[in-house]
Amino acid sequence: MHTPTPRAGRRRRTLLFGAGEAGAMIARSARREPLADMEPVGFLDDDQSRRGHRVAGLPVFGGVDALADAVAVTRAEVLLITMPAAAGVAIRQVTEAGLAAGLVVRTIPPIHELFDGSVDAFRVRTVRVEDLIRRPEVSCLADAVEGIIRDRVVLVTGAGGSIGSELARQLFALGPRRLLLVDRGESALYAIQRELEARLAEGLPGPELSVHLSNVASRAVMNRLLDQSRPDVVLHAAAYKHVPLMEAHPSEAVHVNIGGTMAVLDAAVAAGTSRFVLVSTDKAVAPTSTMGATKRFSEWLVAEAAQRTGRSYVSVRFGNVLGSTGSVIPIFQSQLEQGKPLTITHPEMTRYFMTIVEASSLILEAAALGTPADVFVLDMGEPIRVVDLARDFVRLAGRDPDAVPMVFTGLRPGEKLHEQLFYDHESGRPTANPKVMLARGSRPPEAIRGLALELLGLADGSNEEALRNALFAIVDSPAQLVPAPLPSPSPASMPSRRRSPATIASKA
């Protein structure tokens, strides 16, 4: 598919799709800004009542069906989508129409990415795969979320990560008195610190920022930090998440995902923290990976602390996050730029996908909804084939998906062909937000904290296979029963838990 190359030294003639307030603001901004790379020449909008009218001094030609005529009249080179609240299905329809007409297609960010609520000509960006899957924003609990955040002390672990940093951005706008950011990765932590400090320097209202380069698995550090800061809310996003890497390093998965969760939980309990949210994953459901098993164990730790204290300590479970560190899109981007085939594990592999911004906002809503020991599951829509996601990515890059080779590499250690959001024994119940469901139906094993300590003891040893088997011996036990004692760490006494890709696929 041919995509026109913009000519240097002049502004490109641009049709705007969406004649609402955002479109009008963009058109006026582009005319005011001599450096803006666009010359607005007209609008398209599916609202037929706007056809034939003028917005910001420009004609409204009609909807998608009027695109060809509008291009002929205006000689447009670019189609700019100015619908920040639109669902992905609408973005997809307009994008495909624009690409089929040979136009460069651009967009503005969705409304929840517009930090100060305004748009201008410099907010324009390329259309991304995540734009095609986003769902209409449903915020039934905005007041409740603000009520648990405003003028409170809030602590975010894993604050340099994809979810943690977006949580920090959204929290910043909700008016906490103090916002503590914790991460062991100095570069990522420094990046979000600079971003939020720049907003404060611009005069935007914001909380007192407190940045801590710390390891959540260090009990002494967590105890000291939470004892001094006394957070009202803790959002625990710190974790190791890469499935094949954790298969190779189960002791690190146990130390950080289980040990770190217990360390932060215990410090929160001692500090009187009233709300605690664990960021969990769909891989915690019937796990076949070490990472998923550690996250399931962590859900139990949170439930046990909630039952023991009566506080609103909950877990939030969701699937893959597009654009996050280690996600498929950056990998596809690198492969496409280098002229290499796109690598996909299996032609039928599916995953639940959600954008970073949407997942983070729903985590905050779950925090406001939470009652003790709940596991909330975000509505991820229908699972998407990774092959289809790859084809969308290639198409948005201006290439023909049929001309870009794809190589199927086979499932990696710990991977499933398909994920699920609920256990069979869990009942998904509605909440005040239709995009947040409540999973009920199991309770943590007895003596879960003692089991955690035994696992951490095994993680200090050198027998990774023994640790993996001990972890799965607990996680595979029926949730409502007291699990059997941990098996001996002797390799001779333990069957292997290593699963072949064929086995994993058959269980999916």
Image (cartoon, grey):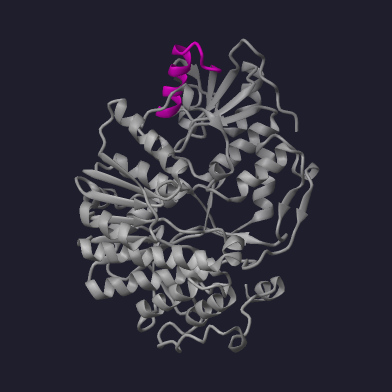
- Where residue 216 appears, x then y in whole percent? 38, 58
* Residue 158 visible in this rendered orientation of the protein: yes
Query: Residue placed at 66% from the left, 41% from the top?
Result: 333
Examine the image and state in which quarter residue 22 appears: top left
Q: Position of residue 388 (x, y in %)?
A: 67, 52
Q: Position of residue 178 (x, y in %)?
A: 24, 44
Q: Camera-side residue: 51 or 43?
A: 43
Q: Residue at x 58, y 14 (%)?
A: 11
Judge by depth and name the residue closer to the eye, 148 or 452: 452
Determine if residue 443 is in view: no
Give the number of callouts.
Answer: 0
Q: Horizontal placement of 485 versus 302: left or right? A: right
Q: Which of the two residues, 435 or 281, is positioned nearer the viewer here?
A: 281
The magenta stretch spans which residues? 21-39
Residue 206's place in the image compared with 155, above or below, is above
Residue 451 figure quarter: bottom left
**Looking at the image, which residue is at 31% across and 45% down?**
171
Give the quadrant of the N terminus: top right
Q: Main secondary structure of the magenta part?
A: helix
How far across and down, in percent of the image, does residue 42 sit? Answer: 54, 20
Q: Please tell me whether residue 22 belongs to the stretch shown in magenta.
A: yes
Q: Is residue 352 magenta?
A: no
- Identify the image quadrant of the C terminus: bottom right
